[in-house]
Image (cartoon, grey):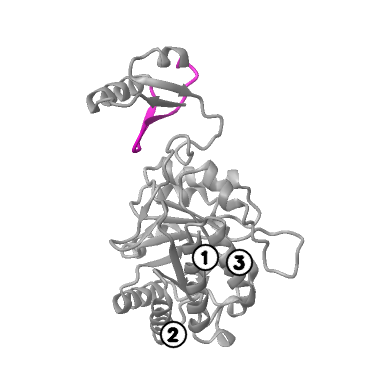
Amino acid sequence: MVAILKHGVTEAQIESLCAWFKAKGLDTHVSKGHYQTIIGLIGDTSKIDTDLLEGLDIIEAATRVSEPFKSANRKFHPEDSVIAVSEAVRIGGGSFAIMAGPCSVENEAQIIEVAGGVKDGGADILRGGAFKPRTSPYDFQGLRAEGIELLLKAKKETGLPIVTEIMDAHHLELFENVDIIQVGARNMQNFELLKELGHTKKPILLKRGLANTLKELLMSAEYIMAGGNESVILCERGVRTFETYTRNTLDLAAVPMLKELSHLPVIVDPSHATGRARLVRPMALAAAAAGADGIMIEVHNDPANALCDGAQSLTPRQFAEVAAAVRRVREAL
């Protein structure tokens, strides 16, 4: 349930109303916009009479939220959330971020070279895999803790904030200096991991699962937000269909749909969605045109010899061309 407050309500009145709700056993989420203040009620609201609420002097309207996701719901938070990654980088609310870097951190020379290349090419955030979930146990699994240390060296060299994927809650201490923690598609419904990430204060990049609905994605975001961490970024990275010419099928309709349902920022990963380097540019442009709040692109200094996902990786020069084209689309919009 959400309670929309009348214009001009004082802080004391809001605090008094929240105290009353809490006495009823409900948690409250206060969202203050430019023109409206909304109190979201979380818990069993079946005993709350909406007519009674609307009869209060300070309440404009009360509405029940039928969707199971509450904190992520735009009805709870009408204005777009803006996630602060660093002093210079924001995602959401009109702020567009480009994340770029290799699928896997392979060695120091590679990540330093790629980091410098993507920064020069227009990236705002450096991405790189340290822990790699692979279908085959015989494939390269990443450098793990060493990979994070190398990412931090690249961050120091370039000043770019970093995003990298977590596989297990037991590794959280290794992510202390990571700017954004990524939850990969395979872990989107690892609820124990999501609960732990809910207790952190870091932005979480949550990727849609290979065969998950938008509702399931938002419910996974809800797990994180229910723990107290509201800094969640949603990522559309394609879903598995019967199509075989591309690695996955990029669901661009998910971008405006998610933004209608939720206040959370939405980014698109055209690299994993298509699996083909030549398709990254058109899908990145389409993502920007669809209203995404950012894109994530895989970039490698030597894609032909990459240890992971070389077929979908751009060179730094190709990335710079794509980033410039995406910026032009953004300007046109």
Query: Among all residues in the image, which is located at the extreme front?
Result: 332
Q: Mark 2 or mark 3: which comes first in sequence?
A: 2
* Label 2 CA crowd tier, 10 Å (few <14, some 14–19, many 20+): some
On the rendered structure, is 99 left or right of 247? left
Query: Which numbered circle lies on residue 110?
Result: 2
Q: Are marks 2 and 3 in contact (CB under 8 Å)?
A: no
Which mark identifies residue 283? 3
Q: Which residue is mark 1?
A: 329
Q: Is residue 327 shown in magenta?
A: no
User: Which residue occupies 51% across, 38% down?
Assistant: 69
SS type, badge 1 = helix
Region of the chain picked out in magenta, as a range: 25-49
Mark 1, Cα crowd under 10 Å, few <14 / some 14-19 / many 20+, is some
Q: In the image, residue 238 lies at what x, y percent?
A: 63, 60
Mark 2 belongs to which amino acid? Gln
Q: Is residue 75 above or below residue 53?
A: below
Label 1 vs label 3, nearer the camera: 1
Q: CA distance from mark 1 to mark 3?
A: 12 Å
CA gap, disc 2 and disc 1: 30 Å
Which residue is found at the position 38% from the left and 31% from the top?
38
Spatial distance from mark 2 to mark 3, Cα to Cα?
26 Å
Count how many numbered circles sit on residues in the image: 3
Between circles 2 and 1, the one closer to the viewer is 1
Closer to us: 220 or 317: 317
187 and 299: which one is in front? 299
Q: Is residue 48 magenta?
A: yes
Compared with residue 71, is residue 238 higher up or lower down, i.e. above or below? below
Q: Amino acid at mark 1?
A: Val
- The residue under the point 64% across, 68% down is 274
Kindly state the secondary structure of the residue where label 3 is placed.
helix
